Amino acid sequence: MRLRERASTKIERGDFLRVPYIGGTTANEGTFFSSSVRLRGLSGQAETDAFVNYIENLVIDNSTLTNNVVSAFVEQYPANDPTAGAPFTTGDSLFDRTAAFYTNEMFLSVRRFFFQHAAARQPMFAFIFREFIPGNDISKGVTHGMELELFFGPPSLPANASIDSGLQTQMRDFYINFVNDLNPGPQWEPFNPRSPRVLQLQSDNVTMIPDDWDSERVDFCNSLKVMAEFEK
C-alpha cells in the first residue's frame, strides 16, 4: 500500500481513529537501536563522521536531508557530553550521543507531536517509564520495551532480574482499568495540551510530571523543516 501523505499531515488534520489512547516512552529508547555504532572506538572527526552517517541512513531516501539540519543535530548532541540524554555510563561517546538523538527524533518527539494534536479530540494518557530492571544491560539504561517486562514478567524478564512488585502491580492495574473502562484511573490524568503532564512510572515515584524535559531539542525535531526532511 502506497502512503499518499505524511503521517504528520494526517495527524494535524485529525485523520486518525478517535479512541482513548495510552502511549509513552522509556527514558533511553535509542540505546536499543544504536548497536551498530557501539564499541567502534572512534573519536574526533572519525566519531562525528560516524554519527552523521548514522543520521543520514535513518531515512530511505536521504536526499531529502540538508547539511544544515544534520549539522544542527551534530551540534545538539556533542561528543562526550553527559547532559545529552542517554545513559552515559559506557564511556562510549558515539553510542551515547547516537542513542540520545534517536530517542528524541524517533520516539519522544513523535509522542509529543501526536498527543499535542490529538488530545483535544479524545482522552489521551501519556507516560515516561524510568525504572531500570536489574538483570538487564546497565549501559543501555531504561531501554526500548523495558516496561513490557513488568507487564508480562517471565519469559520476557532476564533470568536474574529483580523487579519492584509494587510498581508492577500498579502498572497492571492501570492497564486493566483502561481495558475495562477506557480510563486508567484517577491517579493518571488525561493529557492536556495547554498544561502537558505525563505519568512517571518509577519505583516509589509514580506521579504526574511536566512534559517538558529536553524540550528545545525535541521542538527542533518537530519543526516543519526537520519533519519534512525526515518525511514524517
Image (cartoon, helix red, strand yellow):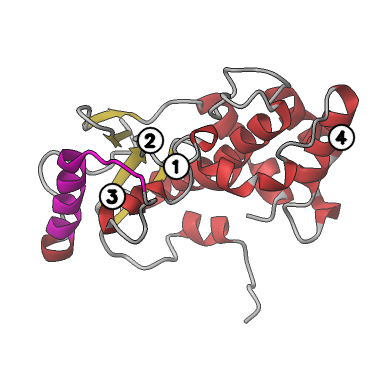
Q: Earlier in the sequence, mark 2 or mark 4?
A: 4
Residue 209 on the magenta segment: no
- Give the CA distance from mark 4 to mark 3: 38 Å
SS class, disc 2: loop
Neighbourhood count class around disc 3 (C-alpha, 10 Å): few under 14, some 14–19, many 20 upward:
many
Asked which quadrant contains residue 80, the reply is: top right
The amino acid pointed to by label 4 is: Asp
Please give the residue where the numbered disc 1 appears in the rendered image: 136
The amino acid pointed to by label 1 is: Asn
Neighbourhood count class around disc 1 (C-alpha, 10 Å): few under 14, some 14–19, many 20 upward:
some
Tags 2 and 4 touching, CB below 8 Å: no
Of residues 98 and 215, the one nearer the viewer is 98
Q: Residue at x 49, y 54 (%)?
A: 12
Q: Earlier in the sequence, mark 2 or mark 3?
A: 2
Q: Give the numbered dot on residue 150.
A: 3
Please give the residue where the numbered disc 4 appears in the rendered image: 49
The amino acid pointed to by label 2 is: Phe
SS class, disc 1: loop
In the rendered view of the protein, which quadrant contains the N terminus? Answer: bottom right
Tags 4 and 1 touching, CB below 8 Å: no
Q: Residue at x 28, y 42 (%)?
A: 191
Task: Please identify the dominant SS of the magenta region.
Answer: helix
SS class, disc 4: helix
Q: Residue furthest bottom?
A: 1
